[in-house]
Image (cartoon, coloured by chain):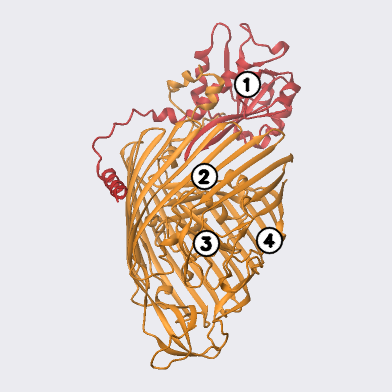
Chain colours: A orange, B red
């Protein structure tokens, strides 16, 4: 007996009109479902950019940090072989603490080091569904430290990664990568497992002769890393979905370091050492989504994340364990209100191995973070005007209660254009680092004077219990339009007002002693939050499908800042942001299954970057040209030849990270093959 | 300074100004909900125009076109529009609840997702007759079906629209003695020869 899955009492009137359409017109009719339409990204009241699988495949980039270069509003600078300084809307540096980065809902931002360890986020790029980048405060939904943006890396579900995938690449200067993934299905259960390994012997040339190392010598930064993982998805019914996923990695990185030492150890007040960092970690995440009734669904998520880093010569080590529990409820209150609320708890257990260079007091500590949020999306005019307002309330052991409210309004006058505006507050909550970190910055001869003192002075950044959280009030406005079916333009403008920005103030010197260094004058730079200021800028993105075989994308970023600096800080350096950036990318499909992709990126100069030895230096602007030639000789086999940084043999992008040599990034060429069956 | 204040004023205005906004157009919610199947039904109707059946199955004013649905019918009453669309030149019949034995009488056979487990069996029977097999099952064209209707998301920037694309297996069609017009092949997203 045939049943009717969808029963309409009478066929709707416009159905017969469709019979009069030509074949081409029929292929162009929009069939998006009502629920999907109400969540349209094109109507979102936020500065969103999505990096698609096609962008990932055709941009030629081989890692997540490199993929982020195409996003307007983001600043991506490779400081060394394993180091990237990435931020959104200013404040770039090693300790980029105003950007939250998540992989499938798990945060990879390490609060104890105020940044993301990009060198250990080695996902298989082929298994990334998309990367959503939201510039601006995402605090209401995502919480503290999403001050200037949120990056959400979303991997494909297991049922979209079935079968076997083998990949390998070989690059100049001995870079080799290999990867394998297998996905299968059993009834309602889909799964995949993967493993990948890379070995990079590329030595990035040392840029700066100030340190004594000659230009052109190797920077001693070979590294290798192996990562593997799995994902399981299953759903017993349409109303419930479950996911379990996990990764594990281990690696070793050679790093050439310039370590400050007292005059009794070396007359130059620094030692050049070839250090080795050991990194390892694992994570497991589970998520359950359940539809209680139409219009009401809950999501439960829990994960465990373990991060290990050992700096052999420096003598410090870091071990962080994170336990996170999250609950979220989406509820359609009535035809005009969509309510979302949630609760979260995170427990972080941190163990630090202290050394002369980096120490925490106490070495081992744990902290709890409690959070709750509520948000309502109100349809003021159905399908056209939406007002979203809400707040997040958080409590952490160091900063107490923080609230982060936000109001957003979007107006869609016609289906192909949306205007939006938002006012939000976000907080970079203070953590253990702000309170208790002691970080040696430099060593130099003690200035002569009375009373007599040890001959060496060691300058250190020290935390203080008097530090507070930093905060921002952000005013944003945006406009998005699809003037023709083949063109889309997205514009965003913002003004950010910051208060209680991190600052440093010179404290009183004391005499200290270390078994290896002897007696020395300890000069503290005490952490405070006395800086403030504002930034404003413009971000633009456009995509044009010129023909069925040619697609052109572009992005532009404009950034201005005015800081009121009471005391300089490693984090508030205003000289590390370029005033302008832009990129232009073209993807061209040629006959015989060939693809020719060209990408150009321009980054303005960084006027006030640090040279790593206490002085500022300007890093000149650079233009980067990448090219990719792809070929599919047989079904399932993808071959490509990729050239990166083709315009210059080498160039510097950022200040060196702490204790590291300034490095230049060189031209590279690689050949890659991927087999699917 | 000026730019900053301007942005601030505009942002605050947006957050406050709610009055002078255009009223929404009347929404045909029921219509939107079934748009996907209206479009798929319209494609079935068009297949009658752009495909030629051989010999005894050829369509003309004396022979009605039989559009058959096998399995759980997702169209509901949408296919009834075909009765209205029948003209003096060509009559259209809609048959539901088709069994394997009925297959040879069909010009177009729409196989519902409910029959996914035995699609191989159905296609084996269809192959011996000039039947245009159509389905929304993923990978239907790879399994030997002739027309696969795929709901595809077309994106440009953040704008995205779901549309119905066709994957047409001409190899199987030709083997059955069917001729598919170039016009139909032209708009297909993928043609398998």
How far across and how far down the image is residue A555, in percent?
Answer: 49, 44
Q: Chain of mark 1?
A: B
> Badge 2 sits on which subunit?
A
Disc 3 designates what residue?
Answer: A654
Q: Nearer the viewer, residue A249 or A550?
A: A550
* Residue annotated with mark 4: A198
Query: Closer to the N terminus: mark 4 or mark 2?
Result: 4
In space, the residues marked 4 and 2 are separated at their CA atoms by 40 Å
Question: Quarter-wise, where is residue B128 in the image?
Answer: top right
Measured from the top left, where is residue A369 in percent x and y? 40, 68
Given residues A662 and A122, the one toward you in this image is: A662
Residue where numbered disc 2 is placed: A238
Residues at marks 2 and 3 touching, judged by CB atoms closer than 8 Å = no
| Of marks 2 and 3, the one in the foreground | 3
What is the C-alpha distance between the residues marked 1 and 4?
48 Å
Let me know if marks 4 and 2 both belong to one chain: yes
């Amino acid at each position: 007996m045939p049943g009717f899955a969808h029963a309409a009492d009478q066929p709707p009137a416009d159905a017969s009109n469709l019979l009069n359409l030509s074949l081409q017109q029929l292929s162009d009719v929009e069939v998006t479902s009502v629920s999907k339409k109400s969540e349209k990204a094109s109507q979102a009241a936020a500065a969103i950019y999505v990096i698609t699988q096609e962008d990932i495949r055709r941009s030629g980039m081989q890692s997540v940090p490199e993929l982020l270069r195409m996003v307007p509003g983001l600043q991506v600078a490779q400081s060394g072989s394993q180091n990237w300084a990435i931020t959104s809307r200013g404040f770039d540096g090693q300790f980029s603490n105003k950007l939250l980065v998540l992989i499938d809902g798990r945060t990879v931002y390490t609060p104890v080091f105020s940044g993301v360890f990009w060198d250990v986020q080695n996902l298989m790029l082929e298994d990334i569904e998309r990367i959503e980048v939201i510039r601006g405060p995402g605090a209401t939904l995502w919480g503290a430290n999403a001050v200037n943006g949120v990056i959400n890396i979303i991997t494909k579900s297991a049922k979209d990664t079935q079968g076997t995938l083998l990949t390998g690449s070989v690059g100049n200067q001995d870079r080799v990568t290999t990867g394998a993934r297998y996905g299968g299905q059993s009834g309602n259960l889909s799964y995949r497992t993967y493993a990948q390994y890379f070995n990079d012997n590329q030595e990035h040339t040392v840029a700066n002769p100030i340190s004594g190392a000659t230009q052109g010598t190797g920077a001693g930064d070979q590294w290798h890393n192996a990562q593997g993982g799995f994902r399981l998805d299953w759903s017993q019914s349409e109303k419930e979905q479950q996911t379990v996923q996990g990764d594990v990695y281990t690696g070793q990185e050679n790093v050439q370091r310039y370590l400050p030492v007292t005059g009794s150890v070396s007359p130059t007040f620094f030692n050049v050492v070839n250090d080795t960092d050991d990194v390892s970690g694992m994570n497991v995440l589970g998520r359950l989504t359940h539809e209680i009734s139409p219009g009401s669904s809950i999501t439960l998520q829990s994960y465990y994340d373990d991060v290990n880093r050992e700096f052999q010569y420096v003598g410090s080590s870091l071990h962080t364990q994170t336990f996170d529990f999250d609950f979220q409820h989406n509820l359609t209150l009535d035809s005009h209100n969509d309510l979302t609320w949630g609760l979260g708890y995170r427990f972080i257990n941190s163990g630090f191995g202290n050394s002369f260079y980096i120490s925490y007091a106490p070495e081992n500590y744990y902290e709890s973070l409690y959070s709750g949020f509520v948000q309502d999306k109100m349809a003021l005019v159905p399908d056209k005007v939406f007002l979203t307002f809400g707040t997040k309330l958080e409590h952490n052991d160091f900063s107490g209660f923080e609230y982060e409210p936000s109001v957003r309004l979007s107006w869609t006058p016609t289906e192909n254009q949306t205007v939006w505006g938002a006012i939000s507050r976000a907080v970079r909550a203070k953590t253990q680092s702000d309170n208790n970190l002691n970080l040696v910055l430099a060593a130099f001869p003690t200035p002569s004077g009375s009373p007599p003192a040890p001959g060496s002075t060691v300058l250190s950044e020290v935390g203080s219990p008097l530090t507070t959280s930093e905060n921002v009030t952000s005013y944003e406005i945006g406009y998005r339009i699809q003037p023709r079916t083949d063109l889309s333009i997205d514009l965003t403008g913002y003004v950010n007002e910051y208060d209680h920005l991190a600052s440093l103030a010179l404290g009183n010197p004391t005499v200290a002693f270390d078994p290896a260094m002897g007696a020395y004058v300890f000069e503290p730079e005490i952490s405070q939050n006395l800086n403030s200021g504002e930034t404003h800028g413009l971000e633009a993105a456009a995509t044009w499908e010129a023909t069925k075989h040619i697609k052109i994308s572009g992005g532009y970023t404009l950034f201005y800042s005015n800081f009121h600096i009471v005391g300089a800080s490693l984090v508030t350096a205003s000289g590390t942001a370029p005033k302008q950036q832009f990129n232009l990318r073209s993807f061209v499909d040629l006959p015989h299954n060939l693809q020719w992709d060209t990408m150009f990126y321009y980054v303005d100069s960084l006027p006030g970057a640090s040279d790593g030895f206490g002085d500022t230096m300007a890093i000149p602007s650079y233009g980067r040209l990448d090219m990719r030639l792809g070929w599919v000789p047989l079904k399932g086999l993808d071959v490509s030849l990729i050239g990166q940084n083709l315009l210059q043999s080498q160039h510097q992008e950022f200040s060196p990270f702490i204790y590291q040599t300034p490095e230049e990034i060189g031209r590279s060429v690689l050949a890659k093959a991927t087999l699917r069956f | 300074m000026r730019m900053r204040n301007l942005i601030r004023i505009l942002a605050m205005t947006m957050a406050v100004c709610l009055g002078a906004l255009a009223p929404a157009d009347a929404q045909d919610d029921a219509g939107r909900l079934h748009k996907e199947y209206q479009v798929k039904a319209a494609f079935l109707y068009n297949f009658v125009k752009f495909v030629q059946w051989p010999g005894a199955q050829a369509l003309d004013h004396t022979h009605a076109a039989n559009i058959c649905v096998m399995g759980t019918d997702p169209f509901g009453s949408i296919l009834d529009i075909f009765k209205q669309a029948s003209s003096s030149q060509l009559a259209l019949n809609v048959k539901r609840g088709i069994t394997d034995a009925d297959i040879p009488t069909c010009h177009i056979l729409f196989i519902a997702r409910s029959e996914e487990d035995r699609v191989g069996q159905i296609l084996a029977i269809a192959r011996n007759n000039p039947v245009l097999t159509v389905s929304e099952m993923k990978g239907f064209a790879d399994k030997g079906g002739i027309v696969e209707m795929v709901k595809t998301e077309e994106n440009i920037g953040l704008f995205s629209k779901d549309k119905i694309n066709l994957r047409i297996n001409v190899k199987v069609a030709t083997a059955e003695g069917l001729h598919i017009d170039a016009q139909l092949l032209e708009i297909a997203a993928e043609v398998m020869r």
